[in-house]
Image (cartoon, rainbow, N blue to C red):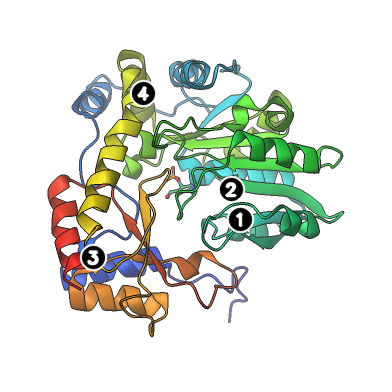
Amino acid sequence: MISSKLPNVGTTIFTTMSQLAVQTGAINLSQGFPDFNGPQALLDAVGRHVSAGHNQYAPMTGLPALRQQVAAKVARSYGVTVDADSEVTITPGATEAIFCAIHAIIRDGDEVIVFDPCYDSYEPAVELAGGRCVHVQLGASDFAIDWQKLSDALSPRTRMIIINSPHNPSGALISRAELDQLAQLIAERDIYLISDEVYEHLVFDGVAHASVLAHPALAQRAFVVSSFGKTYHVTGWKTGYVIAPPALTAELRKVHQYVNFCGVTPLQCALADFMAEHPEHVEELPAFYQAKRDLFCDLLGPSRFRFSRSAGTYFQLVDYSQIRPDLNDVDMALWLTREHGVATIPVSVFYQQPMAEQRLVRLCFAKREETLREAAEKLCAI
Ligand SMILES: Cc1ncc(COP(=O)(O)O)c(C=O)c1O
């Protein structure tokens, strides 16, 4: 019998719910991906680059033209200068960037603080690196950082903290003032940061995303991770990037070089072209997704689900305690899929220790209008 290095990892709920959605013919609002295509010009550019023969290995650090476009976007979005050569690395998805950042820093016995509910790729990467995750719960309803809990969780072994804003699954945002507070808390400590900002351009109601890149005290010790998949509606391309100071980038690249070496060439070429030709795409994204959020929330208004509108991401949490308080959220998600034809994600799977009283499921609104209307109709009928 093989002794598993990850004994607690099984099939994820995302796979389970998506499979169940296919089996039952339910509308899939579970896994986070759009049911519409990315911009046609971006898709066309891939075909063009494949036909033009751009099909061999890309540079290990990423295509220079794409790294430059990322640096230009960061300058426009956050007023910050990052060096495309020594600070930007293109990776096969944000997931690989996170994995490499963790492995570049974490050694046997190190502790990494994560906030629950927490994205599922962090902990296995920490464990494979010989580290241990220390889970700190966010506020039960506002999903804000509890500073006392964070402060209590710090130890001489704390080597890294992973933050995620806009936050999956809650949509909550970390404000600039909270970044200040975090910087103050770890100022005298040898702690690195991963800032998972894959939803950086999905922030609503006129609020500006508080990027760690624009916070010098944190940026000097941070790996800031983003995903072209989220920003350009192409999650299946698994293409992302990570920005970090040169010394951190150099260490990250040593890992990235042997995990994957490089990302997919024609995809990087297409993204570089599209970003150069359509810088407005990023500026239009908040309004694009806010319209979907508002349509979906307006349609859900008459239902018995309770919610406050998501501040960011393409996820909406809904409380079902007025409908089936007897069901835990996993059973609720199964019931919704089987009996009512809508697949969702139970929020407890994002916790090390689920909150027994919580009655929340996550819905993805990165969907066409007709999908949202059809799903809302089913949810309102419950
Ligand atoms: C919070 C968070 N981080 C990272 C990722 C992974 O991004 P990618 O698909 O680019 O690897 C996701 C995708 O769902 C996510 O929600």
* Crowd rating for badge 4 (residues with CA inside 10 Å; few <14, some 14–19, many 20+): some
| 315, above or below 16, in the image | above
* Whole-percent x, y for residue 362 in the image: 37, 61
Q: Amino acid at mark 2?
A: Phe
Q: Which residue was labeled with disc 2?
A: 99
Q: In the image, is 53 to the left or to the right of 239?
A: left
Is residue 286 left or right of 41 when viewed as pictured? right
Measured in 3D between alpha carbons, the distance from the residue under mark 4 to the one under mark 2, in whole angstroms, is 29 Å
Q: Which residue is mark 4?
A: 283
Q: Is residue 133 visible?
A: yes
Q: Is mark 1 within 8 Å of ligand 1?
A: no
The spot of residue 38 in percent (x, y) is 25, 34
Residue contact at pointers 1 and 2, CB within 8 angstroms: yes
Name the residue carrying label 1: 125
Instruction: Work out which quarter of the rendered image holds the N terminus and state it.
Output: bottom right
Within 10 angstroms of label 1, few (less than 14), some, or many (20 or more) residues?
A: many
Q: Secondary structure at mark 1?
A: helix
Viewer-closest of 320 and 89? 320
Q: Nearer the viewer, mark 4 or mark 2?
A: 4
